Amino acid sequence: MRSQSSTAVLDSVPVKNIGKGQAQGQGQGLGSGFVALLPALAMGLLLGLGCWLALTVNGYYVFVLANVALLALTGIGLNVLLGLTGQMSFGHVGFYAIGAYTVAILTGAGWSFWLAWPLAALLAAASGTLLALPALRVGGPYLAMVTIAFGFIVEHGIVEMRGLTGGQNGIMGITGPALGEFASGERAVALLAIAATAVALVAFHWLARGTWGAAMRAVRDTEVASASTGLNPLVIKTAAFAISALCAGAAGALFAPLAGFVTPHTFGFMQSILFVLVVMLGGAGSVAGPVLGAIVVGLLPEVLSGLEEYRLLFFGGLLLVVLWAAPQGMAGIGQYLFARRGLASADTTGMAPATLPLRKRKRQFLQANALTMRFGGVTAVNELSLRAEPGRVNSLIGPNGAGKTTVFNMLSGFYRPTAGSFALGEHTFEGGQAMRIARAGVARTYQTSQLFDSLSVADNVALAAQGGRLGWLFGRAPLAAPHTVQRTRDLLRYCGYTGSLSTPAAALAHVDRRLVEIARALASDPDVLLLDEPAAGLSHQDKIQLAGLLRSIADAGVTVLLVEHDMTLVMSISDQVIVLDAGQLLAVGAPAAIQANPAVRKAYLGEQSARVSITERTTTPAAASTAVPAAAPPMLDVQQLVAGYGAEPVLHKIDLHINRHEAVALLGANGAGKSTLLRSLIGLHQPGAGQVLLNGRSITGAPAERVTAHGMVLVPEGRQVFGELTVRENLQLGAFLTPAQTTDRVDEMFARFPRLAERQHRQAGLLSGGEQQMLAIGRALMSQPGILLLDEPSLGLAPKIIDDLFDALDALRRDGMTLLVVDQMATLALAIADRAYVIDEGRIAAHGTADEIAANEALSQMYLGVGVADPQ
């Protein structure tokens, strides 16, 4: 049971007031409704104009018009793949060729065009499905290369199958369809192409606004989060590939009778480039984009017919201009203009319901049985067993690198455990697909919120409520069902979101993103809710309100497993606290027992593990000889520094100074802003306000390479050595800005770190974690810095290695090096420091000598929440 003090805190929390979203606008009136219809009316008029031209202009222009329509039809299909799922293909000419040759072969064998055309499209779709299954397991440039290879395979396959395709000579005399007495030959093909484009446009509109379209955009935005809501990314992307190939095949099947012949070289790689240009120029993801792009790509060569050899140059230049001026393409410009004229929706969430809108049922416990996860030779989690009961908040805590997120990734199916298993009630899992585990009843949020940014707030939650069941391909019924709409509203209200339901998730403030992500996780009606640092980046008041929300979710019967570094929040709401250290289960118990546990205090604060106590530390002759007069200006002077990653600052008017030859520790819990401060000092993050002075010179906002040249160097968290280079080569690169006497300085680093000398010709990526940390420090020292910043140097290291590392840092201090050390092991950092600052929620909470800070109870409060929960 949680303590009485935590209950008192929670009872005072007005959960329904969490969040800062505001209603947007006053609703849509008649004028805005008409504006919304303008694009559809324009497309209808454009297609009608195309049909009229196909019946009236001469044969040459009919051919050009038909080619524009075929480009648009292929572009609409490619837009499903590129615009909705974000998958790039440079091989769609292969599907185009399959459609064309299928019609040419079948009509040549006596088949009716009306039977050959749909069969060609279906054959292309089947080819797309078969290609997608292996190809979509890769992404980015690798997928593009696979599709390029597919296009070449089709082209050369046609050449080799001479008996069927005619080889290099192709197939001649392909007869076109006739539309009775109305039209025949090229005019009939042009009309069919325009009609097929119109049908494809309507189908794309239905698809894009429907459940499948929402799922495709969700997969594009974040494949990880889509799987954790029950969606199957591979199936969704394969469906997109099949639809895209179907359109390309249908277009190619119309091209064959339009041209009257087909040859392999008609379907070269450059044709695929034109298909991609159609989508990119027009606007990926928009309904009208491929049509607009096809008009430009199809008609521009005719306008520039006298400069045919420069056609690709013009295309390339046009693409660069469009991508620079309008990254969303030509249709994006129109959408922007219409959006400025329209009125925002007033569809807000309203008042919060009194109870959590989940089904009343008995929920399952979560149990891990000897879970083990190894990455190569590193054991991230070792034989972890735990049990989280329904209706309880179970918090999983531990220092950086303890293995908490790895545990979450195993429990949610993103990692397959090396050994062990876990169970949801009586259902046992040995790892596997995240989608399957999500559908079984495990939902989660992420340390960095992963909403579907291109979807509205309502669609984010409504899509998760489907549990992966998407319904008919072109339908929206699952998302628009009255019970889904009402449940979506209720969940968002309960979680405290008060803004517009139609707001795109990308436009949300940080606190609202947290709330919507929790509502989305609850939408699947889970048995278990995994929350990975939900309080990260929130203000103090928002954290208090978040605590009330999490407590109420557990009280509704859900099994809550929380990873969080804010110990005040953890200790105030937890029924059970589970402590990990270096992948091992360290302690399990009630909050008060965990706070008093000596092993936990040692893991968080480094107590009893420092080589030398603060009171025993003496000033060495080397340090004394470099003492700085009291009146000397500070080497590093930080004044009123403000920095953040969005609307809400992470750092609030930080004042900090470090004297020459002084070692300073910067302490605080995870999420307090320590790494953000170091990144702002070194130039990796631009501060919003304030000033940073190095040796009296302003370096505020200067890029990292310039700051390094001025003498301040960062040893980043996680080492970040150059893994493919040897130890010696890493050190030599550290001397890039100061190349004089590089060999002598490398030897000096080997003398300072003897382990590196023994491994100087080994690749850095093969070193142990401790050796990599020594190499990272040695590489930084090679630039002969005036001040060295160290971000979590003890992270993930064994105790003996930590002692050796801090011996080396203490030696640097005694040699007169100016140090700013950020480390989770507070006592170790204080043991080598002259002074220290404590940062909490982006503000300097305390500063003084190392002895004063070590005696300050605020340190235990920040790391372990001591004093929050009453002893049991």
Image (spheres, rainbow, N blue to C red):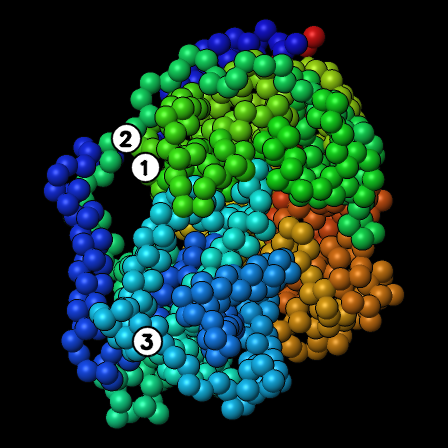
Q: Earlier in the sequence, mark 3 or mark 2?
A: 3
Residue positioned most to the right: 758
Name the residue beneath numbered marker 1. Answer: 502
In the rendered image, the residue lying farthest to the left is 31
Q: Earlier in the sequence, mark 2 or mark 1?
A: 2
Q: Please provide percent x and percent y for residue 680.
A: 49, 51
Distance, label 3 to label 2, CA atoms, is: 44 Å
Of 481 and 296, nearer the camera is 481
Looking at the image, residue 199 sits to the left or right of residue 866; the answer is left
- Residue for badge 2: 347
The residue that disc 3 covers is 67
Q: Position of residue 701 (x, y in %)?
A: 42, 57
Q: Is residue 360 above or below residue 218?
A: above
Q: Kindly identify which numbered label has been placed on residue 596.
A: none
> Please, what secondary structure does the residue beneath circle 2 have?
loop
> Residue 567: percent from the left, percent from the top?
60, 26
Q: Residues within 10 Å of mark 2 (few under 14, many from 20)?
A: some
Q: Is residue 547 above or below residue 516?
A: above
Q: Residue at x 37, y 62 (%)?
A: 76
From what the image shows, is residue 34 above or below residue 146? above
Residue at figure coordinates x 48%, y 79% from the top left: 108
User: Callout 1: helix, strand or loop?
Assistant: loop
Q: Evaluate if marks 2 and 1 touch, with contact meaning CB atoms under 8 Å apart.
A: yes
